[in-house]
């Protein structure tokens, strides 16, 4: 099969920042706090960290191996390496999963844009928790505004995607990631200094293990996969842009640490403030959108101008973090269409953008309580999140581990893991043990438990 000339990330830092840019996004800052809030706080966080390290890391390295070896989009990569087994279809499943996430992810990214606008225009000035909640509920269910923002988000993503891997994705990530981190730290300090913040800190760090149920495990597992962007061919696609010298194991560990750190910081940003102003930690997807304006108002009461600047900057950076993730989601389908249908990158991107806008529009409208957009008792928005995050991604993870642990020749795995023998490969045996046994068994157990079969 003729190999297409593939673009590459330009530097080691570029690799880390682009992959971390994909991983760090709304998943850590928006999704993690609300899931932790619904699932008991500290206990959820511990299970989540365990899942990232024990199950997420081996899956991520496995995806890297598949992507770098195949040098192709996710669908072709798994087809090339999966032979005549059903594992050859994992990449197609990934493209479908990615498309389902892209739509509603762009909707939430659009919410961030609304918040840049609302805080810049001073709409939250002097608004108490009840008013902020009402503002969000009105906005979220509006049939037009969230969709306009969502379309804008897609246009920005489209622009980066058509500018290609190195100039678009890498350059964007290099700038946004460090800035987000610093702003996050500032807001954490502000939130923790609020009166009564200690209860929120305890909620996040004092585990109550009686809260740990099968459902908590499944949510934490899904969140680990979601926040690492694994189980759906995204990291595999990015790894196809890695050079031969990229260290797969240590890159995965660095991303894992960054992702955990951002999640914990996001928890520290939200819960102290939520407890301080009396917002319930289990408010669901609206949690950060109703908590944050209160942090900016209360914590910066002594200098409202500073609060104003920090608020606007924060939403800008959150939007940028969301964009780097959305770019990676978009890239999975764009690379797929570009390479499989032999159409230009621009045309492939246009198809993905158009599909995303339609799906995102439906997801957004589903929050307005429309019957025809409610399936299995859940609005389409929630359904897409649940099916992808808690089912398709962990399931994809099992299949990827089975491919790398049981099907691929050991020499191929060793070569990729040790960069053709130039690295010591100290953790190779541990890695192989995890992908062969630990990951598939643990994920299956969590699924069975959730289905009530265990
Ligand atoms: N990891 C991203 C986040 O936490 O926001 C979400 C995501 C991006 C999931 C890319 C999957 C993916 F392929």
Image (cartoon, rainbow, N blue to C red):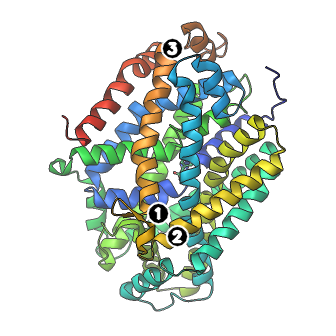
Horizontal side of 443 relative to 302 (left or right) equals left
Tell me the residue that label 2 is attached to: 364
Q: Could you tell me which residue is drawn at 29 percent across and 60 percent down?
A: 38
Point out the tag, 2 or 1, that comes first from the N-terminus: 2
Regarding mark 3 in the picture, which secondary structure is present there? Answer: helix
Which residue is the extreme one toward the front? 372
Q: Residues within 10 Å of mark 2 (few under 14, many from 20)?
A: many
Point out the tag, 2 or 3, that comes first from the N-terminus: 2
Against 411, residue 115 (above or below) is below
Q: Is residue 424 visible?
A: no
Marks 2/1: CA–CA distance = 7 Å
The residue at label 1 has a CB less than 8 Å from ligand 1: no
Regarding mark 2 in the picture, which secondary structure is present there? Answer: helix
User: In x, y percent, where is residue 316?
Assistant: 63, 69
Q: Which mark is residue 407?
A: 3
Q: Could you tell me which residue is drawn at 25 percent across and 67 percent down?
A: 199
User: In x, y percent, where is residue 268?
Assistant: 39, 61
Q: Residues within 10 Å of mark 1 (few under 14, many from 20)?
A: many
Tell me the residue that label 1 is attached to: 381
The count of marks equals 3
Whether residues under marks 2 and 1 lie with C-beta atoms below 8 angstroms apart, the answer is yes
Q: Nearer the viewer, residue 382 or 10?
A: 382
Q: Could you tell me which residue is drawn at 38 percent across and 27 percent down?
A: 439
Against 190, residue 336 (above or below) is above
């Amino acid at each position: 099969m003729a190999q297409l000339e593939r673009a590459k990330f330009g530097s080691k830092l570029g690799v880390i920042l682009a992959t971390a840019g994909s991983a760090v996004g709304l998943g850590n800052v928006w999704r993690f706090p609300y899931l932790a809030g619904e699932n008991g706080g500290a206990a959820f966080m511990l299970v989540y960290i365990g899942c990232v390290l024990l199950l997420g890391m081996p899956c991520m390295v496995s995806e890297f191996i598949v992507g770098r070896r195949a040098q192709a989009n996710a669908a072709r990569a798994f087809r090339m390496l999966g032979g005549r087994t059903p594992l050859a279809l994992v990449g197609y499943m990934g493209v479908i999963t990615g498309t389902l996430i892209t739509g509603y992810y762009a909707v939430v990214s659009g919410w961030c844009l609304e918040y840049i606008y609302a805080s810049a225009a001073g709409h939250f000035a002097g608004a108490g928790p009840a008013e902020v909640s009402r503002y969000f509920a009105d906005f979220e269910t509006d049939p037009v505004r969230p969709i306009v923002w969502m379309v804008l988000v897609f246009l920005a993503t489209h622009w980066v995607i058509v500018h290609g891997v190195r100039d678009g994705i890498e350059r964007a990530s290099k700038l946004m990631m460090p800035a987000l981190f610093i702003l996050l730290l500032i807001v954490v300090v502000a939130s923790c200094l609020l009166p009564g913040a200690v209860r929120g800190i305890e909620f996040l760090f004092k585990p109550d293990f009686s809260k740990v149920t099968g459902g908590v495990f499944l949510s934490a597992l899904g969140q680990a996969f979601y926040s690492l962007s694994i189980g759906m061919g995204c990291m595999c696609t990015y790894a196809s842009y890695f050079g031969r010298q990229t260290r797969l194991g240590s890159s995965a560990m660095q991303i894992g640490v960054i992702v955990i750190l951002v999640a914990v910081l996001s928890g520290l940003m939200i819960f102290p403030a939520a407890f301080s102003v009396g917002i319930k930690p289990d408010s669901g997807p609206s949690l950060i959108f109703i908590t944050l304006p209160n942090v900016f108002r209360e914590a910066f009461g002594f200098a409202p101008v500073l609060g104003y600047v920090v608020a606007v900057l924060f939403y800008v950076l959150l939007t940028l973090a969301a964009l780097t993730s959305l770019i990676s989601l978009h890239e999975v389908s764009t690379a797929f269409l570009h390479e499989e249908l032999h159409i230009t990158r621009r045309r492939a991107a246009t198809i993905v953008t158009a599909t995303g806008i339609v799906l995102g529009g439906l997801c957004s409208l589903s929050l307005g309580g429309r019957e025809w957009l409610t399936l299995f008792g859940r609005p389409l928005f929630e359904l897409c999140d649940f099916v992808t995050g808690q089912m398709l991604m962990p399931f994809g993870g099992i299949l990827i581990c089975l491919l790398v642990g049981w099907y691929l020749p050991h020499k191929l795995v060793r070569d990729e893991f040790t960069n053709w023998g130039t690295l010591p490969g100290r953790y190779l045996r541990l890695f192989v043990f995890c992908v062969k046994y630990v990951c598939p068994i643990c994920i299956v157990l969590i699924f069975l438990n959730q289905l009530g079969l265990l």
